[in-house]
Amino acid sequence: METNVETTITWVIRNFSSLKSVFYSDNFVVGGCKWRLQAYSNGNLTANHLSLVLNVSDNETLPIGWRRHAKFSLTIVNQYSETLSLLQETQHWYEAKSPLPGFLKMILSKLNANNGFVVNGELRVVAKLQVLEVVGKLDVSDEYLPLAVTIDVNGFQILPLQGDSVKRLFERHQDIASNFRPKNPYLKTAYMNFLLSLTQTVCQSTLKLSNDDLSDADAVLAYLREAGFKLDWLEKKLDEVKEKKKKEEACLARLKEIDEELLPYKKKCLDLNAKMDKVKEELSAARTPLSLDDDNVV
């Protein structure tokens, strides 16, 4: 069965330095097959090396005769420079007698914050997988799995849920990235995430935005424009939000002033209401009819 389904998976390994032995990514489904990434650390396979492998999940339970032909690449991402990332590409027939392909290995001492592989305790692994052929029917649903499966929109790798938002950006502002300079795909993804976050900011109510938020938005806008994005339209929107924020603050200040002006009147109203209640009580007493049983009546 020909499938030719290609998917990009990003596995973020958090607290990498504290992990020991063997650890696994979540499962993900590609071309009707369930897969996962597997990492061996601390010299489990080769001393002082991290080893990575892509394998078929639960292969021991699969039916006799199952086979999968997969073309894939594994990348240990250098988050500072794409050219320093470690990449291995291969094709492999997965089957019972050969469930694992060759390993991507790297010396553990080179995986640190100083050279860009481990940043903020996170190591990033990208797997690009194309299932060329599947032999043996599998009962696997396209369930949601929490790895970052990305799609390409105008050269930017983004999450599927971001697809509609990014497509609308390019439809409404076709030259938005015409001068965009960075080529590193991971940097491009980061820039696009900043841009989407900024568009969400300008669409928020001023009630949810502080002046610090707007100051940060200015900094992000300058950062994106420096990278080559054409964002005059977004700058105009941000200016409108800042004006609305000023108006909100002016209204709040005026309401506070009016409330303070009303304080003596409110106190006077309370006093008058108390007097009115007392007079009403006296009025009620005056209207109460007398009784012949009253001791004061002769």
Image: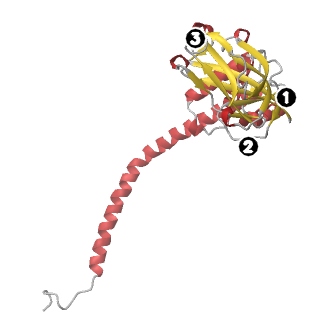
Local packing at callout 3 (Cα closer than 10 Å; few below 14, some 14-19, many 20+) is some
Q: In the rendered structure, which amino acid carries the disc numbered 1? A: Gln
Image quarter of the N terminus? top right
SS type, badge 2: loop
Q: From the image, state whether disc 1 or disc 2 is nearer to you.
A: 2
Dividing the picture into quadrants, the one containing residue 58 is top right
Query: In the rendered image, which residue does mark 2 sit on?
Result: 139
Mark nearer the viewer, 3 or 2: 2
Q: Residue 256 at x, y = what percent?
A: 47, 41
Read off the residue under disc 1.
174
Residue at (68%, 39%) from the top-left corner? 144
Pinpoint residue 167: horizontal percent, then vertical percent.
Answer: 80, 34
Most foreground residue, 192 or 3: 3
Pick the residue in front: 255 or 230: 230
- Counting residues from the start of the chain, the first of labels 3 and 2 encountered is 3
Amino acid found under the numbered disc labelled 3: Ala
